[in-house]
Image (spheres, grey):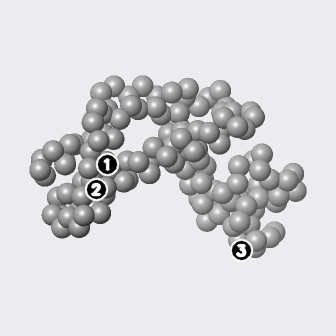
Amino acid sequence: MMSCHSIRPLLPARAEELTPFEARTRAEHVAACARCAAEAAAYSRLGHALAVMADLEVDPADGTLERILVAIGRRRTGVTDPRVLAAAGSAGALVATVVVARAVRHRRRARRPTRPASWPRRPRLPNLPVPTPALARAK
Ligand SMILES: [Zn+2]
């Protein structure tokens, strides 16, 4: 049996990303090694979660772009109010999340085949909480 050290780089890969030899080697090792099996399962859950997120399409609340631009402008002008800085950080995180989600979705759409039929098409998210307008309060 190959060592955990040799198998570890193969653990995050999806099955279609491995050669038949790599897939067989990984399967044999994971069947016999609880630690690597747990790690492989965690990667599998992560991949599933990212695939679900890639299909999320949530429109930002009205005024989100304006608030982000205001936050960027204030950061450049040297705002030190921690509430404003926290709001600007949240806006940056929101933008980063949207960008990553779009990138993942784009990557998935570029691939064939797409998801297994057992994965949810698009989860229903009734009344997602709208990001708190922290900047409005901070003014
Ligand atoms: Zn192992």
Q: What amino acid is found at the position of numbered circle 2 in the picture?
A: Gly
Q: Are marks 2 and 1 in contact (CB under 8 Å)?
A: yes
Q: What amino acid is found at the position of numbered circle 3 in the picture?
A: His
Above or below residue 29? Residue 15 is: above
Mark identifier at residue 5: 3
Local packing at callout 1 (Cα closer than 10 Å; few below 14, some 14-19, many 20+) is: some
Q: What amino acid is found at the position of numbered circle 1 in the picture?
A: Leu
Q: Which of the pair 47/68 is nearer the observer?
A: 68
SS at badge 2: helix
Label 2 vs label 3, nearer the camera: 2
Sequence-wise first label, 3 or 1: 3
Sequence-wise first label, 2 or 3: 3
Residue in the image at 77% along x and 58% along y: 26
Mark identifier at residue 73: 2
Q: Is residue 41 left or right of residue 96?
A: right
Above or below residue 134? Residue 109 is: above
Residue 25: percent from the left, percent from the top?
A: 82, 60
SS at badge 3: helix
Residue 90 in view in this figure: no
Q: Is residue 95 left or right of residue 34?
A: left
Q: Which residue is mark 1?
A: 69
